[in-house]
Image: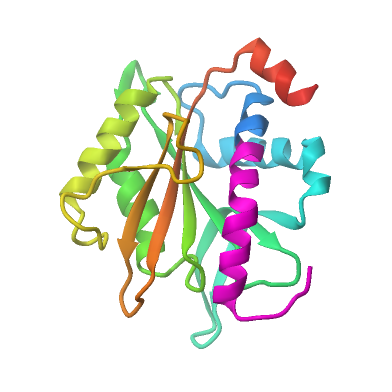
Amino acid sequence: MSVVGSPAEWDDFFSTNFIPQIIDLVLASWQAMSAPAPDQLEDKITIALYCSLSRNQSLCTLPFLIRVQDVEIDLELERETGRKDITFFPALQADVYFCLECKRLNVVEEGETRAYASEYVRQGMTRFVSRQYSPFVRHGGMLGYVLNGDVGRAMKNIELNIQARHLELGMTPPGTFAQSSIKPENEHIRETHHHREAEAAIFRIHHLFIPRTVTPVAVRAATG
């Protein structure tokens, strides 16, 4: 694979060829993990997922690097602007990457369930829309850890929050989920489409919602 071309050209190649494989890798690696506790901290879950991704045998066939808590630096201001949870880089092209911003959802704390849907939108999705993350590409990912297993309720809560903030998210009204263009058959994967400031192309966020429960059959399929 030749390392030439603009970030936009790389983004086209990377998103077309590798985002479907990244999603498959994430789902299989999640199934290979032990289920997190219903009140598990986000960073601990993300590190466990990163370790599972790194152990996945199919990773050696894919031409990209995976980094956890990768620091985003503004070169002009010479300061850190954020830390991307899990990032997939094609070799030798640092400006082009697929970032997964990870958030807990439906967290059980002291016997009560807290949705954390607002945090998912305000502290996750907005980082892509503002170009804090993924400024040179047109795809990003949100990974929701649904810690009580109720994926349907988590997705509904997120969509209601998106609708309430669709203007600041640069979305066409009413601001709802779209079917995944990459995995349309998976009911737990959705897309949202955003207009970022001074950018003509649509930015797509791929939303993956995964429950904490792991089935023995899925584990054997992922690790066999």
Q: Is 21 colored magenta in this rendering?
A: yes
Q: Position of residue 148 (x, y in %)?
A: 41, 20
Q: Residue at x 79, y 39 (%)?
A: 58
Q: How many marks?
A: 0
Q: Residue at x 54, y 75 (%)?
A: 8
Place residue 219 in its image quadrant.
Answer: top right
Q: Reply above or below: 145 against 138.
A: above
Left or right: residue 76 compared with residue 31 = left
Q: Position of residue 18 (x, y in %)?
A: 64, 53
Q: Residue at x 70, y 63 (%)?
A: 90
Q: Position of residue 41 (x, y in %)?
A: 50, 35
Place residue 156 in its image quadrant.
Answer: top left
The color scheme shown is rainbow
Q: Residue at x 36, y 76 (%)?
A: 199
Place residue 67 in its image quadrant.
Answer: bottom right
Quarter of the N terminus within the rendering: bottom right
Q: Is 44 colored magenta in this rendering?
A: no
Q: Reply above or below: 102 against 28.
A: below
Left or right: residue 25 compared with residue 129 = right
Residue found farthest to the top: 216
Quarter of the C terminus within the rendering: top right
Q: Reply above or below: 53 against 7.
A: above
Left or right: residue 61 compared with residue 99 = right
Q: Position of residue 70 (x, y in %)?
A: 61, 60
Q: Reply above or below: 38 against 179.
A: above
Q: Magenta segment, principal secondary structure? A: helix
What's drawn in magenta, residue-wise? 1-26
